[in-house]
Image (cartoon, rainbow, N blue to C red):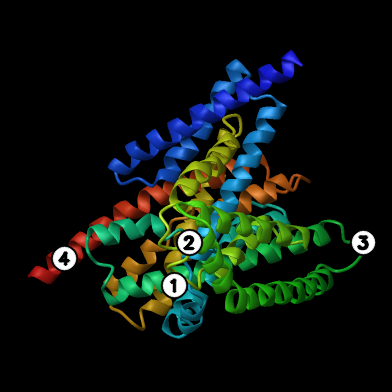
């Protein structure tokens, strides 16, 4: 009993320290216009290094941090869903759709080829990396665009449109990936194509049913429900109730064979119809700031210093694939709409990989079977950090150069 209480107290102490340190780290790194997630990942890396000497991360503490990371994923994807607009997403399938298809297809193909043929990784590992590299964390560079007051430009508006489509497609691809992986790993004599086709059809049917349920709720139930909640509850209570219902939808999705992340995204979409009910509620932000850092801290804790020598080459190859894939995939279609400088600016802004990329890698690593070795996981963390730090610097210089040219 005493040992249990002692372990609980240590775990609570660690959670308190990580919560306070994560907010401090965010305040520090954002002063240098570095994304907060970089600081949070660094905290996780430092915690893992400290544990190698102090051994304070026992099994119970690891499970607790894993649970908090799971909540962080749900909150993160719920927010992405909340900030999306389904009718607008459909309306964007014109000009933005061309750039979206190009950058997703090319970045995924380049990532797969680099992993499969340059690093000689297994088929399923390469497929996972390819899908992970289709995602974009455009929020990393949007801050730079806003600082330069360039978001109202044609290319700035297109950037946001493409990013929204990128988020949606990456989350769907993530759901499909984790639906087919178990079938491909345990196939008995069947060809990969047959297994993939059958599983993909099953996933599509179940996804259509789940999405239809969320759509019906959004159209016919959400407004009445949130209206009644607002009349009964006051202060932050309505928002907390909405988040609780979002967790329920995410859990139902997981029980149906999808991931919590996919369910949380659809839950956010279901509540995104009414901006007044949810988006404008400041009470959601503290929940996000409390739980989201734990996901990235947990990612950082998976960083292996022992795997660094073998991860260095993989990180260099995958970083090149991440940059080349998004750049080519965006520049080629965007060149038909803008001049070369504008298309290049748009392309570099799409390079950062963070939230969804690392969710895919973390989920694949947690699935076991050695799908994602420590060296590859460490390499992808490195790619995430470098793209999130480097891309805003390049974008800032490109925007500054564009402003100078405009004044001449």
| Residue 130 visible to the viewer | no
Instruction: Give neighbour class at mark 1: few <14, some 14-19, many 20+ (Cα, 10 Å).
Output: many
Q: Is residue 229 left or right of residue 395?
A: right
Q: What is the CA distance from the residue labelled 3 to the residue labelled 4? A: 60 Å
Q: Which mark is residue 186?
A: none
Please state which of residues 4 and 283 is positioned toward the viewer in this rendering. Answer: 283
Residue linked to disc 4: 403
Q: Are marks 1 and 3 in contact (CB under 8 Å)?
A: no
Q: Are marks 3 and 4 in contact (CB under 8 Å)?
A: no
Give the vertical position of 318 relative to 223 (above or below): above
Image coordinates of residue 143 in percent, x first then y, are 32, 56
Q: What is the CA distance from the residue labelled 2 to the residue labelled 1? A: 10 Å
Residue linked to disc 2: 136
Q: Nearer the viewer, mark 2 or mark 3?
A: 2
Residue linked to disc 1: 162
Image coordinates of residue 302 in percent, x first then y, are 60, 37
Q: Residue at x 51, y 63 (%)?
A: 231
For marks 3 and 4, the one nearer the N-term is: 3
Instruction: Assign the C terminus to one quadrant of the image.
Output: bottom left
Q: Residue at x 55, y 47 (%)?
A: 380
Asked which secondary structure carries label 4, the reply is helix
Residue 111, image quadrant? bottom right
Residue linked to disc 3: 188
Q: Residue at x 34, y 82 (%)?
A: 337
Image coordinates of residue 331 in percent, x first then y, are 39, 72
Please state which of residues 352 and 107 is positioned toward the viewer in this rendering. Answer: 352
Instruction: Give neighbour class at mark 2: few <14, some 14-19, many 20+ (Cα, 10 Å).
Output: many
């Amino acid at each position: 009993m005493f040992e249990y209480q002692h372990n609980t107290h240590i775990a609570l102490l660690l959670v308190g320290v990580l919560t306070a340190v994560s907010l401090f780290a965010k305040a520090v790194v954002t002063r240098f216009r570095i994304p907060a997630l970089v600081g949070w990942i660094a905290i996780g890396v430092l915690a893992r290094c400290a544990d190698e000497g102090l051994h304070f991360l026992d099994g119970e503490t690891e499970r607790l941090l894993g649970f908090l990371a799971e909540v962080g994923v749900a909150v993160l994807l719920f927010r992405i869903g909340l900030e999306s607009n389904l009718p607008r997403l459909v309306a964007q399938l014109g000009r933005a759709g061309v750039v979206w298809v190009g950058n997703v297809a090319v970045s995924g193909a380049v990532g797969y080829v680099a992993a499969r043929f340059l690093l000689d990784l297994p088929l399923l590992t390469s497929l996972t990396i390819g899908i992970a590299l289709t995602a974009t964390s455009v929020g990393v560079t949007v801050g730079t665009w806003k600082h330069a007051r360039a978001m109202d430009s044609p290319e700035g508006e297109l950037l946001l449109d493409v990013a929204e489509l990128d988020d949606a497609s990456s989350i769907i691809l993530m759901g499909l990936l984790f639906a087919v992986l178990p079938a491909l790993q345990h196939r008995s004599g069947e060809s990969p194509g047959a297994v993939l086709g059958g599983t993909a059809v099953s996933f599509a049917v179940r996804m259509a049913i789940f999405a239809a349920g969320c759509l019906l709720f959004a159209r016919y139930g959400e407004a009445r429900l949130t209206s009644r909640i607002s009349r009964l509850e006051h202060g932050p209570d309505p928002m907390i109730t909405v988040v609780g219902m979002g967790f329920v939808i995410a859990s139902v999705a997981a029980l149906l064979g999808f991931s919590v992340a996919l369910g949380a995204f659809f839950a956010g979409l279901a509540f995104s119809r009414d901006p007044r009910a949810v988006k404008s509620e400041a009470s959601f932000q503290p929940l996000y700031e409390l739980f989201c850092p734990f996901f990235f801290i947990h990612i950082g804790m998976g960083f292996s210093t022992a795997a660094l020598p073998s991860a260095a080459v993989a990180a260099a190859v995958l970083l090149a694939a991440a940059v080349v894939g998004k750049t080519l995939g965006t520049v080629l279609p965007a060149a038909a709409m803008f001049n070369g400088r504008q298309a290049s600016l748009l392309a570099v802004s799409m390079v950062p990989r963070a939230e969804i990329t690392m969710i895919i890698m973390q989920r694949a690593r947690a699935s076991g079977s050695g799908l994602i070795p420590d060296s590859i996981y460490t390499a992808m963390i490195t790619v995430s950090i470098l793209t999130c730090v480097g891309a805003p610097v390049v974008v800032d210089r490109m925007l500054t150069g564009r402003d100078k040219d405009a004044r001449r």
